[in-house]
Amino acid sequence: MSETAPQPKPVQRRAISRPIFERTFNINSEQAIRVIRNSYNRLMVSLYAIDVILRIIGREETVDEIESIVGQMIADCAEQLQQEKLRLEKLKADNGITETPTYTHPREFVAKIASPQIAQFVELIRLLDQLMIVMDTLWLCQVISNKHCIDARYQWQQRLQRLANKIVTMERHAHQAAYEQGHGEEVRLARQESGLLAEPERISEDEDSMVDDNELSPSSEKVGDR
């Protein structure tokens, strides 16, 4: 009776040691908290996965291109947030308002900065929080209406979540392209050693319009337009 040949043991691939910053922030507004809860962790994973996958299939120039695209998308959103924040701060000053509200359930946010793009998005979340604080101040002081405030909170929260979803979709496309080019096993192993899921997390078609159950339906009016 012949003996079965011993099967070779799978090679244990060494986990990659990569640089990371940990920064702790207090986040006050419910809208910024929701962006962190719904989008931040998935976005951080996707940005790292894009880098891993595209380098495996020999397209490092595409990594640079995607980094540039992502950086520009985040920068454009930050500029829009900043412009609206300045507009509302002027409205606050014009009405002689000097108070700033406190929040009943702020959250401590520990951001793990694993790439420059993650750092950019974290600053975007903080800027959203600052904008919401000014907006809430104007609402509490009856400068803007409840209806207008609800709409603007929703729109700005969704803007950041849609941006994050676009980046996650880039990861899904990069993963699919790698498999189509015959790099499936390389990608699977690389994702495994990098602590990523073997397959990217899917985004449903409805997620671009994702709303928390307790968020009221918005109107199309702009905050501050009276």
Image (cartoon, grey):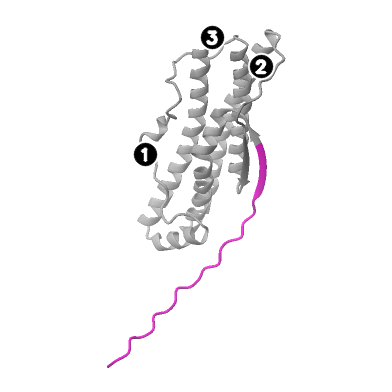
Q: CA distance from mark 2 to mark 3?
A: 14 Å
Q: Position of residue 219 (x, y in %)?
A: 44, 16
Q: Position of residue 200 (x, y in %)?
A: 42, 50
Task: Check disc 3 and report the residue beneath it.
Answer: 225
Q: Who's the residue at 59% across and 25% down the image? A: 81
Q: Are marks 2 and 3 in contact (CB under 8 Å)?
A: no
Q: Earlier in the sequence, mark 3 or mark 1?
A: 1
Q: Residue furthest left?
A: 1
Which span of residues is magenta-colored? Answer: 1-25
Amino acid type at mark 3: Asp
The picture quadrant where one finds residue 91 is top right
**Residue 89: assigned label:** 2
The answer to whether residue 217 is left or right of residue 13 is: left
Tag 2's secondary structure? helix
Q: Position of residue 71 (x, y in %)?
A: 57, 38
Tag 1's secondary structure? loop
